[in-house]
Amino acid sequence: MSLPAGSGVGAGSVGPAGKGRRRPGRLAPVVGKARKQLQNALAAAGYPSRVLVACSGGPDSLALAAIAAYFGRRGHVDGHRVSVAGVVVDHQLQDGSAQVAARAASVLRELGLSPVEVRTVDVAATGYGPEAAARDARHAALESAADDLGCDAILLGHTLDDQAEQVLLGLARGSGTRSLAGMRPARGRLLRPFLGLRRQETEEICDVEELDPWHDPSNADPAYARSRTRVEVMPVLEEKLGPGVAESLARTAAILQQDADFLEDLANETYLSLVQREEGGVWLPEDAVRGLPPALRFRVIAKAAADVGGQQPGYGRLQAAEALLRRQGSAGPVQLPGHVSVSRLSLSDLAQERTVSTGAPAADATGDSANAGPREAARCGKLVFRHQKPSQQ
């Protein structure tokens, strides 16, 4: 991993440790805007007393580190005490990554963050692509560092441009509301205070603070979908549709986040009211699931799959599972991601199983099988979700 010519991301371009980067004079408007956004994010999070800045050395995260360092030097946010630590994650995916990580850590220390750590991770293949694998490894390292350093919040430097790209990628993949809602401003300990800033504004902050950021070459690598979106797609949209496309996409994400949260809460309440547990899995009463609006029905099925250890199913798999509701008699199994199978068991088949096993008809949990006629029993039943251990080949 090579640094830009004359970069000197370290001792040559950073002032005395703990004394800040700003020279006396008028506060740059972009710095004031960024400080306000971080201040609002920390206030919304309940004023965490110890925060951790995740920094790659790039413009976005380096600008965030400089803004967070200001509050760290003050020692408080709105009168609430705060201290600021830093962490750099080395993914080991490019030559020279250790050198870049070390220099980024040096900048953080000279800005006044303390302590500052470098966490080295091994990015393992997950089947969801290299970007997802790197993200999973990075988040695990950040959570571990926050635990070790006693930090209540982890600050990430994603910008409005990142949010716009995320929405476009979700559209291209045919994803649902949750994906189109983009990145959340807050998710657990993860805070993204710069989702209201443009990427050019973080670069301006670095200029004001006299910081020389590292530019990751993978951000312009057409091998990655996000890079193609950033370098090729967004400029064309801005040219053909006019300025403001990124802001509109980010605004769409903010609106959809509210919708997604509402549907998620409603689906969770509905699922908990319907789910029945049995040895080896869970089941849902078919009639109740069939009567749900489609937006809830698909979410409830997905929650059942997750409940038994599965992964989020794609739309096609959810359609296949939902189609079991229109079958008569037992049907399936339909395979869902994460080694989960879902099957439809009809009331008549359940009654027959009870008769064979006990020698006499027995009332099933979905109704009184002894009083149900054959056709009625065939139309009633339940969806059963079970986790299957992968076969050892």
Image: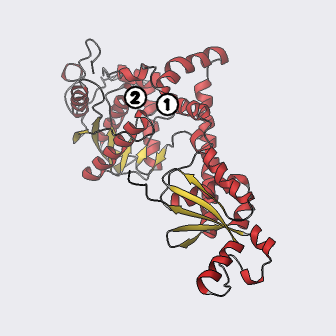
At which x and y percent is residue 105?
23, 32
- In the image, farthest residue toward the bottom: 360
Which residue is located at x 44 percent, y 50 percent? 45
Which residue is located at x 30 percent, y 20 percent? 212
Indicate the amino acid at tag 1. Asp
State yes or no: discs 2 and 1 in contact (Cβ < 8 Å): yes
Nearer to the camera, 181 or 1: 1
Q: Viewed as shown, does residue 257 lie left or right of 217?
A: right
Can you identify the residue that label 2 sits on?
60
Which of marks 1 and 2 precedes in the sequence?
2
**What whole-number distance in Å separates the C-alpha atoms at marks 2 and 1?**
10 Å
Indicate the amino acid at tag 2. Asp
Which residue is located at x 22 percent, y 40 percent? 117
- Please, which colouring scheme is shown? secondary structure
Q: Viewed as shown, does residue 126 lie left or right of 286?
A: left
At which x and y percent is residue 168?
58, 30
Mark 1: which secondary structure?
Answer: helix
Nearer to the camera, 118 or 349: 349
Nearer to the camera, 209 or 234: 234
Relative vertical location of residue 149 with respect to residue 11 in this rendering, above or below: below
Q: Quadrant of residue 5?
A: top left
At which x and y percent is residue 46?
43, 53
Tell me the tag on residue 162: 1
Nearer to the camera, 247 or 78: 247
Mark 2: which secondary structure?
Answer: helix
At which x and y percent is residue 261?
60, 51
